[in-house]
Amino acid sequence: MSEASTYQALRGHLAALRLAAAAEALPRLLDEAKAERWSSTALLERLFALEVEAAGARRHATLARLACLPAPWRISDFDFEAQPSVDKKLILELETLRFLDDATNLLFIGPPGVGKTMLSIGLGWAVIDAGHKVHYTTASDLAARCHKAALEGRWANMMTFYSSPSLLIIDELGYLQLPEEAAAALFQVVAQRYLKGSTCITTNLGIASWAKVTGDPVVASAMLDRLLHRSVVINIDGPSYRMRAHRARAEAARKAVGGNGR
Ligand code: ADP
Ligand code: MG
C-alpha cells in the first residue's frame, strides 16, 4: 500500500471507531513525529492519549450537565477562617470521597447564609471530577417532580432517576412545610438510596424538629433512622457569610461617605 492510501485507511479506521480527537490531531502529530523522529510507539501513545483526554472531557461535561449544580463553587473557595464552626479537617476528609464507598449520608444543619449549600456543591464537583454521578435538587423541587410523576404514572421512573447518582444533594429541606405526599416522596427517595448511595441534605432545622417538615412524626423518624444510620452531621452555627459581606460593604460605604464629609 502506498503511503497515501495507508494514510487514507488510517483516517477511515479512526472515523469508523469515532475517534474524532485522534483523527483531528493526526496530520499534526504525523508532522511532529517526522520532524522530531518519534518512535512508532511514541506516536501511537500521543495519538491515543489525546483521544483518552477528549473522552474524559466529554464524560466530565455530561456528568456536569446531569448534576444540575447551581453554582461553580469548590471546596477550595470556602473561607474556613470566616466560619470557624466548620471543621476544616472533616470537610477535607469528605473531599477525598471515601464517604461514597459505604454510602455515608451527609447532613448540613444551620441557619441561612452559613455555607451549607456552598459546601454541598463543592463536594458535588469533587464527585464529578472523580467521574461519578451527582444530582442536585431542592427538597421542594424533588417533591414537586415526584408529585407530577405520580400523576403521570411515572413514579417508578422517578424513583430510578433519584436512586442512580452516587451523590444526591437535597438542598433546603425545612424552609417550606412540605405537604404530606411530598414528605412521602422524600421518604421513598431516602429509603431507596439507603445503603446504596450517599444522600446529602442541607437544612435549617435541628434534627429534633424534623417532624415539623414532614408533618408526620412516624415518617420523620423512619427517614431519620435511615439517614442517620451511617452519616456525618455537620452543624454550622457561625455567622451568616452573606450578612458578613453585606456588613463589610455597608462599613466601606460609611467610611467613604465619612471621608467625603470631612
Ligand atoms: P446556606 O446554604 O447555608 O444558606 P450558602 O452556601 O448559600 O449558605 O452561602 C451564602 C453565600 O455566602 C454564598 O454566596 C456562598 O458562596 C457564600 N459563603 C458562605 N460561606 C462562605 C465561606 N465560608 N467562604 C466563602 N463564601 C461563603
Ligand atoms: Mg442554602
Image (cartoon, rainbow, N blue to C red):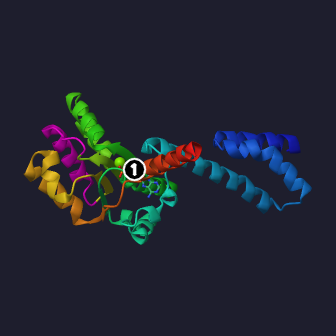
Pinpoint residue 226: horizontal percent, then vertical percent.
20, 59
Prevailing secondary structure of the magenta residues: helix
Viewed as shown, does residue 27 lie left or right of 192?
Answer: right
Front position in the image: 123 or 247: 247
Q: Taking 251 as reference, is 93 above or below it?
A: below
- What residue type is disc 1 on? Met
Q: Which residue is mark 1?
A: 243
Residue at image coords 43%, 50%: 247
Does the magenta portion include 182?
A: yes
Residue 82 at least partly seen: yes
**33 in magenta:** no
The x and y percentages for residue 259 are: 57, 47
| Image quadrant containing the N terminus | top right
Give the answer, above or below, for where 238 lies relative to 151. Answer: below
Q: What is the quadrant of residue 109 in the picture?
A: bottom left
User: In the image, which residues are magenta?
Assistant: 175-195
Left or right? Give the position of 52 relative to 202. right
Q: Please tell me which residue lies in front, 246 or 236.
A: 246
